[in-house]
Image (cartoon, rainbow, N blue to C red):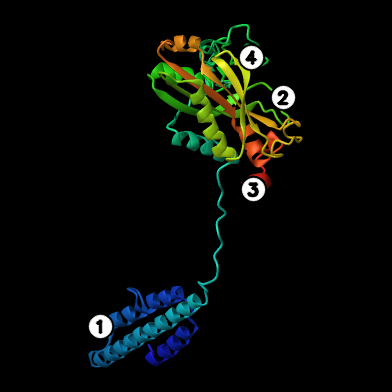
Amino acid sequence: MDIEAIKAKIDKEIESIDSSEALTAFRLKYLGRKGLIAELTKGIANLPSDQRASFGQEVNALKSKIISLITEKEKRLGSVKEESFARVDITLPGISRQLGHLHPLTQTINEICEIFSRLGFSIVEGPEIETEYNNFTALNIPLEHPSRDVFDTFYLKDKNKFLLRSHTSPVQIRVMKSRKPPLAVVVPGRVYRPDAVDASHSFMFHQIEGFLVDKGIRFSDLKGSLEVFAKAIFGEEIKMRFRPHFFPFTEPSAEVDISCIICKAKGCSVCGRKGWLEILGSGMIHPEVFKQVGYNPKIYSGFAFGMGVERIAMLKYGIDDIRLFFENDLRFLKQF
Ligand code: PHE
């Protein structure tokens, strides 16, 4: 075999190599176990003895040449790689990931719960499927009460036993039955009522219940706690008023209004020209409720309140349609 011819062929071949894959193939072709050099080396044994030494030297020289060609090519390919790497401008701004945030209702729930946490209330949750007993009977709501009607409550198949809770008050029963006073608890959660959906009604909405039981709790404790809450969430400058009302599970009961934050109590379309906005229902826990949970109403007293989260958020942020909370429209959600 003509070594000189091989050298010329190799020179040409190495010239055209432009990738490390091609270089690996080249290395195998010449230096591999079944490569050209191995073949030539094997062939030495078959040569006449006087030619073996010189041919062997030529093969060795060829092998060294190939190795140095490969080493050189490796360096060149490597520097090309470095060059293309240098062309990436690492100082350019990257593509940022869009960050989401909590839903405005979740933010409102968190804010309300935080205010009551600072007052020493703990946060408890209850199930959305409730017994008729917890939702109504134990809360002193009689069988003939209209809210127990199928038009006002979603009953599950097993009627007269399970329902979708229509308020968070049944968690009062659960907590009072499983703990002893003193206790102070807030309960955020979903509630359900079969209302036709419009700008101010939804078949599902959120409430936050709050209640506190101890010896010697008075109406003034309720007033003070709710005033701290209302000022923390709506601003120090708002005024409050307690309007007599009726709830079967509190006595006395009151609805709480704040001075209209939109018109500063002058009268506008949001407050119906009254200057006042209703924000929650409240009262002193009814002795009948205490009897149901096994507390002695002669020893313990307490207050309870319940508010609609959507309503609070709508007033706070000036939102005029409850449906906006549930449509998942990013143009709305991004504003919070
Ligand atoms: N559960 C009442 C409602 O849904 C609100 C309320 C709670 C009133 C606690 C008084 C005390 O309307």
Q: Quadrant of residue 241?
A: top right
The mark found on residue 335 in the picture is 3
- In the rendered view, would you say 116 is above or below 75? above
Q: Amino acid under label 4?
A: Ser
CA separation in Å, label 4 and label 3: 36 Å
Whole-percent x, y for residue 243 in the image: 63, 22
Of callouts 2 and 1, the N-terminal one: 1
Q: Which residue is mark 4?
A: 147
Q: Callout 4: 10 Å neighbours few (<14), some, many (20+)? A: some
Of callouts 4 and 2, the N-terminal one: 4
Q: Nearer the viewer, mark 2 or mark 1?
A: 2
CA separation in Å, label 4 and label 2: 16 Å
The mark found on residue 196 in the picture is 2
Is 49 in front, or is 20? Answer: 20
Is 310 in front, or is 57? Answer: 310
Q: Nearer the viewer, mark 3 or mark 1?
A: 3
Whole-percent x, y for residue 172 in the image: 48, 20
CA separation in Å, label 4 and label 1: 108 Å
Q: Callout 1: 10 Å neighbours few (<14), some, many (20+)? A: few
Of callouts 4 and 3, the N-terminal one: 4
CA separation in Å, label 3 and label 2: 27 Å
Residue drawn at point x = 50 percent, y = 77 percent: 84
Q: Amino acid under label 2?
A: Ala
